[in-house]
């Protein structure tokens, strides 16, 4: 038995290392390169980073942070198979996109033109609106329940986990819409201001950048979440790459940003999450990045269909309640299955995972096989459409925001993108700025 287990382990490692070569070949054939970030390359990169690299660590039980909750190696093999199939099918969708709509090129025009005065005023107006929404949100939450203040000991008697729950899953209001303004649209404002400063080189452009940038950083950190601040760092990097090198990313630049991000995330673990020292903090960051989302996928395969039958579309959005069903609380249900003790404490949690997890929960592996190539084709087509715009601060920021928006497929169900109110809102804001509506 040990000999057979050893052969399975060796075979697993060999195929696990070989599959990325297949994906690389497929992406090259589709004209997609990791050295020139696009929506397809970023989505694949995020899935490989967050969902694939860490699989051996859980399969061989090498991650001490998760060894107690990831016990079944057979389930981990299924996770590996599903993730590998999803990446392959996405790449096939990109190939199909190239054949149907042509290669991805770049924006029309090569010279970045600064915003006109009325456009700059419109950006500032939207920034003020976002800050006001942030203040309104904090008023509803209550300043005594801000998680970051509890984490640094300024709000004694407030449990950090409870505060995070109140600020998110258990928020007494339409959290999605508050989040849209105080994160997504505010990030759009800050990135446009950053491009405006880089292209105009006017010192006066630093003032709104500093004001709205400070508000955004607080908004990203106030619930003691690590992902949002990491995404912001990546967004700044992508904007800089497209501004200075026409989207060509070089290794030294990637390494510098990776080190900066690791330092910031490690500091947050030491300050806010109780890491005992830098070694513990770095270990926690590595575990969160490489195995955190993989663990979630593992629990989805345990939960469906053994504990809960196939959802058959019930987790998908029901805009305006026009359809005769109540959307199933997928991420919350899986979290309650994994951590029932949190429910007893009144903490409302969630456990999202890679897009194929929701497809599997609704109709098994068949849904993953049928839908995934369609997603790949749609992502490729959308990137192709974005490249038809002329290069200016709004088109560049929309492109960068879209890359990170769809990169969330590595840790968010497909339902989020079917009724994509965030994309619609961002498009409306940027169109309004370009056409002098605001």
Image (spheres, rainbow, N blue to C red):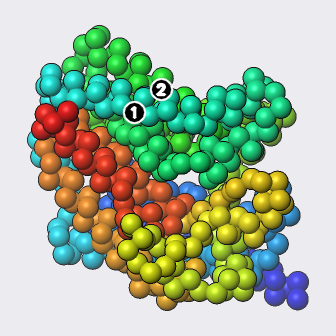
Q: Tell me the SS state at disc 1.
A: helix
Image quadrant for the C terminus?
Answer: top left
Label whose residue precedes the other's in the sequence (2 or 1):
1
Farthest residue to the top: give it: 203
Q: Is residue 244 visible?
A: no
Q: What secondary structure is marked by label 2? A: helix
Question: Which residue is found at the position 64% from the left and 28% from the top?
Answer: 143
Q: CA distance from mark 2 to mark 1?
A: 9 Å
Q: Residue at x 30, y 69 (%)?
A: 378
Q: Are marks 2 and 1 in contact (CB under 8 Å)?
A: yes
What residue do we see at 65% from left, 56% from top?
Answer: 290
Q: Which residue is mark 2?
A: 215
Residue bearing mark 1: 130
Is 68 on the left-hand or right-hand side of 354? right
Left or right: 220 in relation to 346: left
- Which percent across, then down, holds residue 383? 26, 58
* Horizontal and vertical percent position of residue 214: 48, 23
Q: Is residue 217 above or below residue 91?
A: above
Toward the viewer: 258 or 133? 133
Along the line of sight, which residue is nearer the eye, 361 or 47? 361
Residue visible at 68% across and 83% down in the picture: 308
> In front: 161, or 40?
161
The quadrant in which the N terminus is found is bottom right
Q: Residues within 10 Å of mark 2 (few under 14, many from 20)?
A: many
Q: Nearer the viewer, residue 249 or 340?
A: 340
The quarter of the picture where residue 291 lies is bottom right
Point out residue 29 in the picture as x, y percentages from the top left corner. Answer: 30, 70
Residue 429 visible in the current orientation: yes
Disc marking residue 408? none
Which of the 4 image quadrants contains residue 279? Answer: top right
């Amino acid at each position: 038995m040990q000999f057979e287990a050893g052969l399975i382990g060796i075979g697993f490692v060999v195929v696990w290392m070989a599959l990325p070569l297949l994906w690389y070949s497929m992406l090259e054939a589709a004209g997609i390169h990791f050295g020139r970030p696009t929506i397809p390359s970023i989505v694949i990169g995020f899935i490989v980073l967050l969902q694939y690299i860490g699989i051996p660590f859980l399969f061989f039980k090498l991650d001490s942070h998760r060894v107690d909750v990831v016990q079944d190696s057979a389930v981990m093999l299924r996770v590996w198979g599903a993730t590998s199939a999803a990446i392959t099918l996405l790449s096939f969708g990109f190939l199909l996109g190239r054949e149907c709509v042509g290669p991805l090129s770049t924006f029309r025009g090569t010279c970045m033109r600064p915003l006109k005065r009325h456009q700059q005023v419109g950006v500032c107006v939207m920034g003020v609106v976002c800050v006001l929404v942030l203040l309104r949100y904090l008023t509803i939450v209550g300043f005594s329940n801000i998680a970051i203040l509890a984490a640094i000991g300024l709000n004694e008697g407030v449990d950090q986990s409870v505060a995070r729950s109140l600020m998110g899953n258990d928020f007494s209001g339409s959290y999605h819409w508050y989040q849209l303004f105080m994160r997504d649209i505010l990030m759009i404002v800050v990135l446009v201001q950053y491009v405006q400063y880089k292209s105009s080189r006017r010192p006066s452009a630093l003032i709104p950048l500093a004001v709205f940038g400070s508000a955004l950083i607080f908004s990203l950190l106030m619930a003691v979440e690590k992902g949002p601040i990491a995404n912001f760092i990546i967004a700044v990097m992508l904007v800089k790459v497209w501004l200075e090198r026409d989207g060509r990313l070089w290794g030294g630049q990637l390494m510098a940003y990776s080190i900066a991000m690791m330092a910031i995330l490690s500091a947050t673990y030491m300050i806010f999450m109780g890491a005992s020292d830098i070694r513990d903090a770095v270990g926690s960051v590595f575990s969160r990045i490489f195995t955190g989302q993989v663990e979630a996928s593992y629990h989805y395969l345990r939960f469906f269909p053994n504990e809960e039958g196939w959802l058959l579309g019930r987790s998908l959005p029901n805009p305006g309640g026009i359809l005769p069903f109540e959307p199933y609380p997928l991420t919350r249900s899986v979290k309650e299955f994994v951590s029932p003790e949190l429910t007893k404490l009144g903490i409302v949690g969630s456990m999202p995972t890679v897009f194929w997890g929701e497809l599997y929960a609704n109709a098994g592996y068949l849904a993953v096989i049928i839908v995934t190539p369609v997603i790949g084709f749609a992502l490729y087509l959308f990137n192709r459409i974005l490249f038809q715009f002329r290069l200016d601060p709004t088109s560049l920021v929309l492109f960068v925001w879209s890359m990170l928006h769809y990169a969330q497929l590595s840790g968010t169900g497909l339902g989020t993108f079917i009724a994509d109110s965030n994309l619609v809102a961002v498009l409306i804001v940027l169109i309004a700025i370009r056409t002098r509506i605001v």
